[in-house]
Amino acid sequence: MGNDNTPLDLSVLTDLAVESRNLAVERTGGEIEGVTLDEEQVDDAKITRIQVMNQQAAKAIGKKPGNYITIESEGLRQGQRPLHEYLSGVMADELNHLIHFENLNKNSDKEPTILVIGLGNWNATPDALGPRVAHHLLVTRHLYDAAPIEAREGMRPVCALAPGVLGLTGIETAEILKGVIDKVHPDLVIAVDSLAARESKHLASTIQISDTGIYPGSGLGKKRIGITREDMGVPVVALGVPTVINSVTIVSDTIDKIKEHEQLAGTDLNNRLQQINEEQKEEIINQILQPYLGDLIMAPKGIDKIIKDVGRVVAGGLNVALHPDIKEEDVSMYLQ
């Protein structure tokens, strides 16, 4: 917690590429060169695919070059099992389009080995998505080599690990992961983590997939060693769901909303708010949140059930994507 008079960092704290891109467009007043956007509505889900094509574009939106896919659905927050199974299937389709499994292990006739990392703190519910997903995965690496060839069809060697967080282990997660990679030699790492959002509508209703890796805690302003292809030496796919939002963004959005709607504040106050520039707004937010609330991170109501349900959706999608013989309608059968 900030307990001095240091000004709060009002830079946007978000892990979502779709939010970063939208904010960059709002800031510049036009599309960002080198960033492509494709949107698709499929039944109960909206899929947004963003490609950051070069370093200039990456600097403009604050995201590494690569592909970012978001699947948005209000149904993700709801406890409807058929809808959750459908969303697991949508997620699996997007993973299969992003990951070219046939290219991962060209030097062997065996299926590629996939290591799934459940990032996060299992003692803190909003940060427990990764360990929850790892718990529900169908892991097969320990059985794969011992199984008859005919039994391996439709199955890939998958292993999983929930390494905890620096505060629990005293070891950087990336250091633990690098040691495991050096022993297990996976062809692909999939890192699952809880994310931070800027807009409350994205909380527990959005799944993001990217092929750029992940920097744990970056959406909350923390600096950690990256879990990326460059750091790990193998391809890394990052997958997560936003479960928290920063107090700074809530206060900032509240001010903006009042400025937009005169009836919320009355004519006189609204007129005064219209004259506030970004620097003045930053000063107001500092006065409201300092000295104790600047680092306040909030999770939605009912986070325990949300993590439980979303963990099953994400694990189900991974099981379908990683094991070709598992079908969407059979997701529940394979959740541990």
Image (cartoon, rainbow, N blue to C red):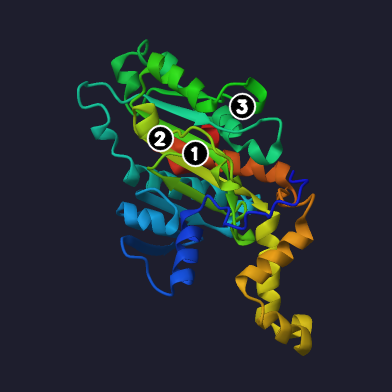
Question: How busy is the neighbourhood of tag 2: few (under 14 within 10 Å), some, or many (20 plus)?
Answer: many
Judge by depth and name the residue closer to the eye, 120 or 225.
225
Can you tell which mark lies on residue 215? 1
Q: Tell me which amino acid carries mark 1.
A: Tyr
Question: In the picture, which quadrant includes the C terminus?
Answer: top right
**Mark 1 or mark 3: which comes first in sequence?**
3
Q: Is residue 103 left or right of residue 23?
A: left
**Closer to the N terminus: mark 3 or mark 2?**
3
Give the secondary structure at mark 2. loop
Q: Residue at x 71, y 87 (%)?
A: 271
What is the spatial separation of the Cα atoms under label 1 and label 3, in whole angstroms? 13 Å
Q: Kindly state the secondary structure of the residue where label 3 is placed.
A: helix
Give the labeled residue for mark 2.
228
On the rendered image, what quadrant is the N terminus found in? top right
- Amino acid at the residue labelled 2: Thr
Q: Is residue 188 above or below residue 309?
A: above
Any part of residue 121 in sight? yes
Please, what secondary structure does the residue beneath circle 1 have? loop
Mark 3 to mark 2: distance in Å? 18 Å
Residue at (70% x, 55% y) in the render: 247
**Image coords of residue 105 (percent x, y):** 25, 26
Whole-percent x and y of residue 114?
39, 27
Kind of residue at badge 3:
Leu
Q: Is residue 216 above or below residue 8?
A: above
Left or right, 188 with reference to 13: left
Q: Is residue 28 left or right of residue 257?
A: left
Circle 3 is placed at which residue position? 166
**Within the image, what quadrant is residue 34 found in?**
bottom left
Q: CA distance from mark 2 to mark 1?
A: 8 Å
